[in-house]
Amino acid sequence: MKQTFLLISFFLFTVIGLAQKNNGLSLKDYPEDNLNAYFDSINNQSKDKISFLTHSYDCYVIFTVNLDGSYNDFEILENSLSPLHPQIRKYIFSLFQPTNGKWILDASDETSTSKKAVFLFSFINTKQSMEERVNDQSPLVEFSLMTLPEEKLRRGIPLNQEKKITLKF
């Protein structure tokens, strides 16, 4: 029963992630509606840095994008029930470092001088069985349903504002 619940939850998170619209941010030289293209291209070049890991990992990345394209207040929010390997933390920073100065805010919101960005990152170990992946990702379901909404509200981030990025290694 628990496994069925986890599979259904995993499916729902995947469907919701695929159905997302642009969250008002884009990167120079990448399609506005597909930030995945940037992260996929960097991941394809450097995933050997995390290929030794034996689990799949999920976390949220929260930061503020400024009008000049820079970002600040960069934070990785991880689930305490499923902490990130230190190498994944370094890897996330390496994915974002080249983006500083390249973010573009949605032009339709002329009054905004900055925007909070929230990304859900899933790092999927392709060497794992589906059952192992579901077990690694099951703490995310509880975290996303219970802890994260409260954390977003505390920080003044709209509950529906997040972009899902899935990277395989």
Image (spheres, grey):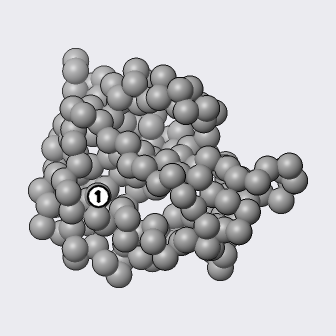
Is residue 13 visible in the rendered image? The answer is: yes
Classify residue 20 as left or right of residue 50.
right
Point 51% across, 52% down: residue:
73
Image position of 44 with respect to 74: above or below? below
Q: Quadrant of residue 102?
A: bottom right
In the picture, measured across the screen, residue 40 lies left or right of residue 29, that is left
SS assignment at label 1? helix
Q: Rate crowding at label 1 as few (under 14), some (14 to 19) or many (20 or more) other CA atoms within 10 Å.
A: few
Residue 168 horizontal/vertical position (percent): 32, 63
Residue 169, given in percent of the width and then of the height, sits at 26, 66
Residue 86 sits in which quadrant?
Answer: bottom left
State the count of labels.
Answer: 1
Q: Is residue 7 left or right of residue 155?
A: left
Extreme residue toward the top, this view:
1
User: Residue 76, image x and y in percent?
Assistant: 38, 49
Query: What is the x, y in percent for residue 9?
Result: 38, 30
Amino acid type for the residue under numbered disc 1: Arg
Relative side of 152 to 169, left or right: right
Question: Going 29% across and 36% down the picture, which residue do you hit?
Answer: 79
Q: Which residue is mark 1?
A: 89
> Which quarter shows the N terminus?
top left
Establish if 64 lies above or below 1: below
Residue located at (37% from left, 71% from top) = 94
Would residue 163 be seen by someone viewing this image from the given angle?
no
Residue located at (42% from left, 50% from top): 75
